[in-house]
């Protein structure tokens, strides 16, 4: 069942997502060769608590950190560690917060110093396909319109879409129905309605779409070892179209 939210609830969810967006933009400024992903994790938790919110991921199904930091061939759910970020790496930062009883969830992928042209293109296409998906999030459209728009843009650029992980509804819980695949067929799936709040999160691979989970039980990596990028926004469908709740203004 997809839970529709009132305009008041959407404003509260916006509050949670604004905290997430501010923290992601703080972390983005810290990304330089030499920093460890553990430092980013510590900082994200400190900033969250300072704002009177809670990190959403910490303790979720036993996940031990506040932040997911996924480097290069890591797709999502990379665990912060003493790993040092180097010039030429790309790092996905995925962060969630619980505030006034509602969740916020967003992600960005950031270059570390100067990166290859191919890495830049992967990051650009992944962010673009997120916006192509959001553009379809209108009442009267169907879920498959979001998925198909994302897949089309990714595959036109010569990249591939991860199948094994999907976006989701969000609200009083981090993951609600519907699941939102980043591949699919136009005009299929449930009808979209005003009041739906969705976390849309394309994961895009430079090579093939296949992924595997490492022995730590969390870190998802590309099967072929090539790069992957991830962007996520939480959005609300309103009668005036999609509104990005995790947009930094
Ligand atoms: N943005 C991710 C998601 O929506 C983050 C969850 S990671 C976990 O699934 F650590 F919380 F599991
Ligand atoms: Co999410």
Image (spheres, grey):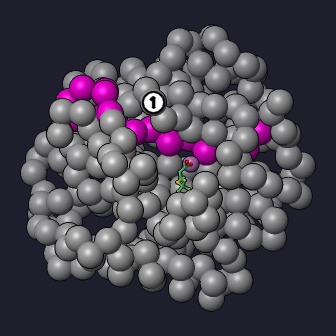
Per the image, the residue denoted by label 1 is 164
Q: Which residues are magenta?
A: 196-211
In the image, residue 74 above or below residue 47: above
Quadrant in the picture for the C terminus: bottom right
Q: Name the residue located 69 percent from the left edge and 21 percent from the top edge.
A: 141
The reply to whether residue 106 is in sight is yes
Find residue 226 and report its image quarter.
top left
Find residue 37 and report its image quarter.
bottom left
Q: Position of residue 188 (x, y in %)?
A: 63, 11
Q: Nearer the viewer, residue 173 or 112?
A: 173
The reply to whether residue 126 is in sight is no
Q: Name the residue located 11 percent from the left edge and 47 percent from the top edge.
A: 117
Check if residue 200 falls in the magenta segment: yes
Q: Position of residue 239 (x, y in %)?
A: 80, 37
Q: Nearer the viewer, residue 203 or 144?
A: 203
In the image, residue 52 above or below residue 77: below
Quadrant in the picture for the N terminus: top right
Q: Residue furthest front?
A: 215
Q: Name the residue located 17 percent from the left edge and 40 percent from the top edge.
A: 225
Please count the marks in the image. 1
Q: Name the residue located 56 percent from the left edge and 12 percent from the top edge.
A: 186
Q: Nearer the viewer, residue 149 or 214?
A: 214
Q: Is residue 34 left or right of residue 133?
A: left
In the image, residue 55 above or below residue 204: below
Q: Position of residue 155 (x, y in %)?
A: 31, 22
Check if residue 239 falls in the magenta segment: no
Q: Position of residue 92 (x, y in %)?
A: 35, 56
């Amino acid at each position: 069942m997809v839970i529709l939210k009132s305009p008041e609830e959407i404003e509260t969810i916006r509050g949670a997502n604004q905290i997430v967006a501010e923290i992601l933009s703080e972390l983005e400024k810290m990304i330089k060769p030499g920093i460890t992903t553990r430092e980013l994790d510590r900082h994200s938790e400190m900033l969250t608590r300072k704002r009177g919110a809670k990190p959403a991921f910490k303790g979720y199904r036993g996940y031990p950190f506040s932040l997911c930091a996924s480097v290069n061939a890591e797709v999502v759910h990379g665990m912060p560690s003493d790993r040092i970020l180097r010039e030429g790496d790309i790092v996905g930062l995925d962060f969630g917060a619980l505030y006034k009883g509602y969740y916020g969830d967003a992600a960005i992928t950031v270059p570390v110093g100067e990166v290859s042209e191919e890495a830049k293109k992967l990051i650009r296409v992944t962010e673009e396909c997120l916006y192509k998906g959001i553009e379809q999030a209108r009442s009267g459209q169907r879920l498959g319109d979001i998925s198909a728009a994302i897949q089309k843009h990714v595959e036109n650029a010569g990249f591939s879409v991860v199948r094994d992980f999907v976006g989701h509804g969000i609200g009083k819980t981090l993951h609600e129905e519907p699941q939102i695949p980043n591949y699919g067929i136009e005009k299929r799936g449930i009808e979209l309605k005003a009041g739906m709040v969705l976390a849309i999160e394309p994961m895009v691979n430079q090579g093939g779409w296949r992924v595997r989970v490492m022995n730590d039980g969390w870190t998802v990596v590309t099967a072929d070892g090539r790069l992957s990028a991830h962007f996520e926004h939480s959005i609300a469908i309103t009668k005036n179209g999609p509104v990005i709740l995790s947009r930094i203004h």
